[in-house]
Image (spheres, rainbow, N blue to C red):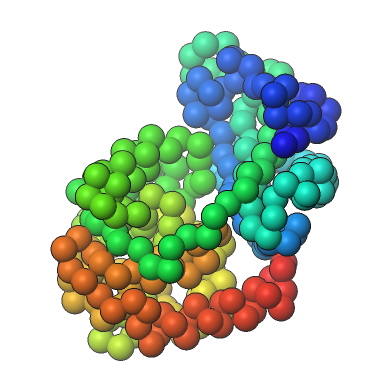
Amino acid sequence: MRFWLSHAGGLVDAADARVSVLDHGFTVADGVFETLKVVDGTAFALTRHVDRLERSASAMSLPAPEREQVFAAVRETVDANAPMLGELARLRITYTAGDAPLGSDRGETGPTLVVAVSTMKPWPESAAVITVPWPRNERSPLAGVKSTSYAENVLALARAHEHGAGEALMPDTQGRLCEGTGSNVFLVLAGELLTPTLATGCLAGVTRDLVLEWSGAVEADVDLSALEEAEEVFITSSTRDVQPVHRVDARSIAAPGPVTAAVRDEFARRSRADVDP
């Protein structure tokens, strides 16, 4: 594999892909990132992801990434690795504050941009999820920011795996349903397709936004306990697309239900028709 590094001036072999131990993204998780799926050598919804990268950088008071540089780095990385990627791959854009003194103060060397790619297996047809008690802080300055500070997600996902599940769903500090560790959540409640509002601190997921645009889903504040009554549940992410949920904690749910199946099929149809919607 070959990865793109800004301080190297472009592509380097994976064995030579190195970031400084003084990079603020490494020492204090001072950075933002995007994860995309690559289908048949094309990164899906790239413009939306770069738009969100810019919003995340702005929210963290990082210099705006050079937009055309990001687009070019993605193209070069995908093209260089195309023979090894197959039909489906995962691509990550990481953008950090760059080298800095040890501590919280930022340095003056400028940001670090890394684009990396790897092969990816399709997700299972459906997922089991659990709920965890650790809330998202909707009042945090990082609420809704795709920050590299992911330790809370790592712990919650590890708890899910311990319970035989593939994802963990969490509330916000008010007990409202928020999001998963790497996904947004939708549920059918009394026949209506709902997803948590951004006021809960959930990430404005690219796939979430597309599902809202392409379906009859609406944003609503619902308690975490609504999962106990939901007729259908599914989760979305840039690599999962629309994934039905067949179990929440100890409760089994039909997966996919009719609403989920319709949303999944429509998403698949539209995403095939337009790779950069």
Q: Which one is in front, 185 or 241?
A: 241
Name the spot of residue 78 as percent of width and height, x first. 76, 48
Task: Identify the residue at horizontal 68%, vertical 75% (top origin).
Answer: 272
Q: Percent x, y for residue 62?
A: 62, 35
Report the side of 261 relative to 44 (left or right).
Answer: left
> Where residue 65 sits: x, y (%)?
72, 40
In this rendering, the answer to whether 12 lies above or below 133 is above
User: 188 or 255, which is in the foreground?
Assistant: 255
User: Which of the 4 quarters of the picture holds residue 129?
Assistant: bottom left
Residue drawn 69% across the image and 34% down it: 114
Residue 265 on image: x %, y %: 53, 82
Outermost residue to the top: 101
Residue 58 seen from this side: no
Query: Split into 4 quadrants, where in the image is the N terminus?
Result: top right
273 on left or right of 191: right
Q: Quadrant of residue 183?
A: bottom left
Residue 97 in view in this figure: yes
Judged left or right of residue 204, residue 277 is right
